[in-house]
Image (spheres, rainbow, N blue to C red):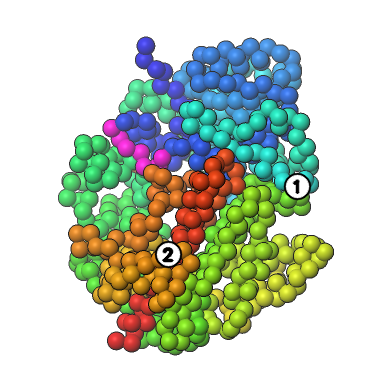
Amino acid sequence: MTKPRYLTKSRFKRALECETKLFYANKKDYPDQKIDDPFLEALAEGGFQVEELARIYHGGGTLVEGMDYDGVLDITNFLLLKEKVVIYQAAFKFENLFIRADIIVKNGNKLDLIEVKAKSIDGKDSMDFLNKSGNLDTGWIPYVYDVAFQKYVVTKAYPQFEVCSYLMLADKNARATVDGLNQKFLVVRDKEGYPQIKNRYDLASLVVGKEILIKVKIDDLIGRIYGGTDRAEPPSILFSDYIKMLSDYYQKDERLETPLGGKCKKCEFKCEPDELKAGFKSGFRECWKLMAGFADADFEKPLVLDLWDYKCKDRVIEEGKYFMDDLSDDDIGNSKPKKSGMTRTERQRIQIQKAVDKDDTMDLRVGELKDEMDSWRFPLHFIDFETTAVAIPFHSNMRPYDGIAFQFSHHTVDKKGKIKHEGEYLNVGRGRFPNFEFVRALKKELDRDNGTIFRYAAHENTYLNIIYRQLQEASVNDVPDRAELCDWIRTITHNSGSVAEQWEGEREMVDLLDMVKRFYYDPKAGGSNSLKAILPAILNRSKYLQEKYSRPIYGTSTIPSHYFKDQVWIEMKDGIVTNPYDLLPPLFEGKSDEQLEEYITDSTLAEGGAAMMAYAKMQFAEMSEEEREMVIKGLLKYCELDTFAMVLIWEFWNNEVHK
Ligand code: SF4
């Protein structure tokens, strides 16, 4: 018997990103680069724990277990015969649509349909999902449409019930009233690799305190979706017809063609070269051949999709401009210079020119960069933070998804150019709120002199602002040095969104990423400015660094290190320097950083995806002492390399400007 081709909740969500993906999804010959590991997904954002907490709030329910479609539908049907019942993971089917609902509360002929999401909301009703123009905000579309789809199936399957729909989210304005709540929800892998909460049934008697999740009724928004009035542009077909179209195409296993656009940049159906060689199919290539008439050779040309920070991809692709070469001056425009160095559009023009001319030389603004570098004070300090945000707070009085800074690394360079891995901090304790200890340790590291401090991107400034706010909210009895720490944070930061006050610190950190964007473009970084892309670019560019770091000087008295010994950073393969990050043992066996970052939907956190996942594993998953030791070692090495990579950028530039 052939398996039914149901349009499920997850397939519907995938179609919302791009309807064509339905054709490639779950087919062995089309590799899917978005790995699907529910256990890692559960760890990444605490979704599993949030769902468990929501079940506790709706206690006394029955969990519908099993994967067999008919079996779970029968159980649900049977449970719904009761006058009053709470069901977790109830199953509903209408034609070839099939869903599992997180929580159903039945009372007479009323059904509450509750979808639980590991996402926070700073508000209390459905109006908070609207943008300034009164339309559904883009960020909320996947969540609200998901419930709209579920309500459609439930209403069609059981027309006799009146269905009310809710999104249950972490309430940013709530505070936990009990300590150690999140450690009650430890995640374990079951035999099939799926996440399970340890001791699930003991949780029924758990004291969880005041609710930290908020249930928002969204039937008004769903009504607007059904009527086609939720967005500025009315849709070409009604929601019900849209569902029918998707499910028909999916059932017949036919490709639903959709316009190409900026969305294709991150398409998961791209093949790696070795996969193509092995005979696998690339959904991405099929789409571009079909819709844009591409030949194989066209995939080798620089595409508009790869242009850095370009916001008009959809428009130019719609106009048939697929290659960087096709873009006119007007397509790029001119951004106004705010500081010295390249502007955004100037940098884009440089990228286009170099890509089209196959020009591999770098563009380093030596004069302007030197002026900037001359203003830096020795000893130079390079810092990097690893952070996370947990759904269920560690302590009473904390809010859901409040920031946690669990690790930093620190390198210094003195006036004579002596490099040293100076120090670090890593919270290894389970269930501890580390932020105040973290900032004390950081202050101790940086307070010894007045040297320039470097960060890479806004992250360190943002997190110090979060800690500043947390300190302000803490009691003096609990944190006696509160004022001293706050005063110090103000000296090295500027205020960001999370605090109301305004300041610019006299020793404010310098953003090395901003320096890269303004003074250095290198085709070897492939249009990316992330530290993981810039590091191999400079190592492949600089003969000076290649020569110096081919020798085992890192982790010796020449360059002291805490976690490396006699390390050689230059390893050549086919004439190319191997990315030093690839020389480290993976934090998760078989998973690349990029794959792990796919699990983090909060883009401000994604860069440190691998470290964040490793920390979540230490905090919330069961692991042996040996495994724990390995994760700790891995985290320490990763973070040390992050700050050493920043030192190498400085060293490369320093060598170039003094040539
Ligand atoms: S290549 Fe583009 S159109 Fe094709 S499936 Fe991917 S995102 Fe959709």
The N terminus - image quarter: top left
Toward the viewer: 633 or 582? 633
Q: Identify the secondary structure beneath mark 2.
A: loop
The C terminus - image quarter: bottom left
- What segment carries the magenta color? 29-35
Toward the viewer: 39 or 71? 39
Q: Residue at x 78, y 68 (%)?
A: 480
Residue 523 on image: x %, y % = 28, 66
Q: Residue at x 57, y 57 (%)?
A: 387
- Name the image quarter holding residue 204: top right
Return the residue at label 1.
Answer: 179
Residue 412 on image: x %, y % = 49, 77
Sequence-first tag of 2 and 1: 1
Left/right placement of residue 454 relative to residue 568 reads: right
Toward the viewer: 221 or 532? 532
- Name the image quarter holding residue 477: bottom right
Left/right placement of residue 446 relative to residue 641 reads: right
Q: Magenta stretch containing residue 129, yes or no?
A: no
Left/right placement of residue 485 relative to residue 236 reads: right
State the separation of the CA atoms marked 2 and 1.
38 Å
Magenta region's main secondary structure?
loop
Q: How many marks?
A: 2
Return the residue at label 2.
Answer: 564
Callout 1: few (<14), some (14-19), or many (20+) C-alpha neighbours within 10 Å?
some
Q: Residue at x 42, y 64 (%)?
A: 564
Residue 24 on image: x %, y % = 34, 33
Q: Amino acid at mark 1?
A: Asp
Callout 2: few (<14), some (14-19), or many (20+) C-alpha neighbours within 10 Å?
some
